Amino acid sequence: MCYFTKWPECLALPDQTAEKVACALTEEVFCRYGVPFVLHSDQGRNFESEVFRACLRLIDIEKTRTTPLHPQSDGMVERFNRTLLSYLAKFVDDHQRNWDERLPWALWAYRAAVHEATGFSPAKLTFGREMRLPCELLYGRPTPDAESYPAFVAKLQSHLRETHHAAREHLKAAAGQQKYRYDLRSHTVQFEPGDLVWLYAPVRKVGRCPKLQSDWIGPATVIRSSSDLVYEIRLPGKRTTRTVHVNRLASYKEPVPE
């Protein structure tokens, strides 16, 4: 998805190896819409592989990634996945084997709908015009005025600038509302290098009841902070470090002796 226009692309692949994913992105996205400045993804092995990273370096794309078990760091795509599943649930047959055939129709509906955050449809922000829909076969569409080509181009450029400016204002307002609602329930926690912390790492174990087991492991040692929200920690007995979001950390207190 494009973070500005909210235009989504979904491809049904037989598997998700690094080669298949890199090939699909290159042929179906980059060759069609151009090369992005930054590509943001989760920490799936296909996105973190050397093959995938080499492809991005070849075409000069900066790679960023989410922190594990923190869906908010990729909230736009996670929210779109929820919407897409609700679309497909209305389209697929009872046997549910034809979801890949219904995927383009679900994307068509999403791209033509006005997005709540921008105030415009993804098609409008991407192409400068609305998509032609089947309902226009019944009701028709306005007949465009006869214009010379240069005048039309100048009008289109002006219209795109106005649309993008309005979309940016809508995005700022939506981001402010989301930040306000998030800050109501959030509490700032900071750690210093050397602090001991608990790490939230829910893992189901065979023969153990998940309701009775603890999802916190540690104590881990804080190595450094990449930002106010991302920390690099080392678990006891491990040489490698892990980068996690602050929401998965909690202060560790030494147990009081009996």
Image: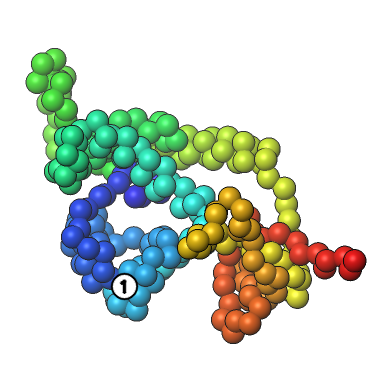
Left/right placement of residue 247 relative to residue 65 reads right
Colour treatment of the image: rainbow
Instruction: Pick whichever, 258 or 77, lies toward us.
Output: 258
Q: Residue extending furthest front?
A: 207
- Check disc 1 and report its element: helix, strand or loop: helix
Instruction: Pick whichever, 51 or 55, lies toward us.
Output: 51
**Percent from the top left, x then y, of residue 189?**
73, 56
The answer, for residue 248, to whether it is visible in the render is no
Answer above or below: position of 24 versus 195.
above
Residue 63: image quadrant is: bottom left
Answer above or below: position of 133 versus 52.
above
Count of number-bearing discs: 1
Q: Residue at x 57, y 62 (%)?
A: 201
Residue 40: image quadrant is: bottom left
- List the residue tagged with mark 1: 52
Left/right placement of residue 118 relative to residue 149 reads right
The answer, for residue 205, to whether it is visible in the render is yes
Q: Residue at x 63, y 37 (%)?
A: 180
Q: Residue at x 67, y 40 (%)?
A: 185
Under mark 1, the amino acid is Phe
- Determine crowd level at label 1: few under 14, some 14-19, many 20+ residues with C-alpha closer than 10 A: some
Q: Residue extending furthest left?
A: 137
**Percent from the top left, x then y, of residue 206?**
48, 63
Q: Residue at x 56, y 38 (%)?
A: 178
Left/right placement of residue 143 relative to residue 62 reads left
**Percent from the top left, x then y, of residue 133?**
16, 28
